[in-house]
Image (tube, grey):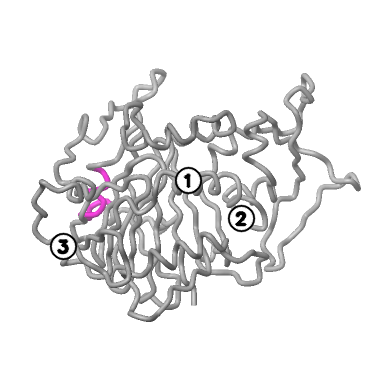
Amino acid sequence: MYGETEPAAAAASERTAFRQAEKKYKLYKPPSTKGRGRKKTIGGGVGDLSEVVDFHALLAGGVELPAGILRCDCPGFDLPVFRFLDRPGFYFIPGALSTEQQCFWIRESLKTFPQPPNRTNLTALYGPIFDLLTAAKNQKVLLEVQNSDGQESNERSNSGEKTCSINFKFVEHSKIEKGETRRSTTATTLVRKLRWSTLGLQFDWSKRNYDVSLPHNSIPDALATLAKKMAIPAMPSGVEFSPEAAIVNYYGPSDMLGGHVDDMEADWTKPIVSISLGCKCIFLLGGKTRDEVPRAMFLQSGDIVLMAGEARERFHGVPRIFTESDQQEISGLVSQLSGDDDRFILDYIHSSRININIRQVY
């Protein structure tokens, strides 16, 4: 969703240092047994992760800080903060959220954040979808239905954007008759197909700007309060961060986020507050062009990253998430999500990552 579309630009990006780093760490799917595709490996087998910065190991002590990395004290902020000397405006807060807080925001990301009027990547295909997580837990199916007047609608949003022209509703799986020709998709499949949802001011991906005419709710109070607190290291003394929008990204086992710059907010001195939940990933922080070699670091569940000022001009991305069954980083989540009501969420988070990034738009 952040990728360039021009063929020449895409070809040029393949030769850049940032692209080479993405290829180094990317998780490649094994070839299909039906095809004759060239065998691919996972970042060169197990992968050389020796150059990936592990801030949790640095926080634990006993490891000398690598050259160019500082641990800093921030007035009015009681959590450990790391930064890179050569990348001003970037702040890494390891373990910022407790296990209980992580579980709360994972539940919110799957249950509340995809609720209309918030938009998701599914909205254009199916229209507004209510109570998706509940439907998935109950193994319901989203079924195409005819409008009450017997005609397909051809609605447009207030901004003139084409919306879904067919209505859908959740039904019990047993209600799907044999030979049914109408389109249907299980709610479980739709949860797995979630890739983004937008909170607060709605972001228009086609125009790459915020569309204030779209219906929206304010950022949830609890999320706004958390963002204001975590933004302190990147804010001038006495100035408070004002959360106005958030984008929630959902990553499946082989998903990645290509190198990009977040440049659609008016004031780049204000940080993006980025919260990591679920499976661990590799995060790349590059330079102002793709030609600069990026720094690679692990992001674990509960970590928070701030990007403000000059850091807002730097290319960054996520080439890989780790979903191995023996992943110790989410063991705390597993114990907290062991109840019957969280069984679906636990299964989801075993192989998924969620990122909530909060922004001040104006």
**Pointer 3: what residue?**
70
For label 1, count other residues whose C-alpha is less than 10 Å away and answer few (under 14), some (14-19) or many (20+).
many
**Pointer 1: what residue?**
250
Q: Name the residue at 46% across, 63% down.
A: 358
**Pointer 2: what residue?**
119
Indicate whether 90 appears above or below 192. below
> The residue tagged with tag 2: helix, strand or loop?
strand
The residues colored magenta run 14-23
Q: In which quarter of the image is residue 133?
A: top right
Q: Name the residue at 37% across, 36% down.
A: 330
Spot occupied by residue 315 in the image (x, y as percentages of width and height): 30, 61
Q: Name the residue at 52% across, 51% down.
A: 196
Q: Name the residue at 68% across, 58% down.
A: 162
Spot occupied by residue 140 in the image (x, y as percentages of width and height): 69, 31
> The residue tagged with tag 1: helix, strand or loop?
strand
Which mark's residue is nearer the viewer, 1 or 3?
A: 3
> Residue 96, can we see it?
yes
> Residue 312, can we see it?
no
For label 2, count other residues whose C-alpha is less than 10 Å away and answer few (under 14), some (14-19) or many (20+).
many
Spot occupied by residue 287 in the image (x, y as percentages of width and height): 23, 64
Amino acid type, mark 1: Tyr
Horizontally, residue 296 falls left or right of residue 36, namely left
Residue furthest to the bottom in view is 238
Amino acid type, mark 2: Arg
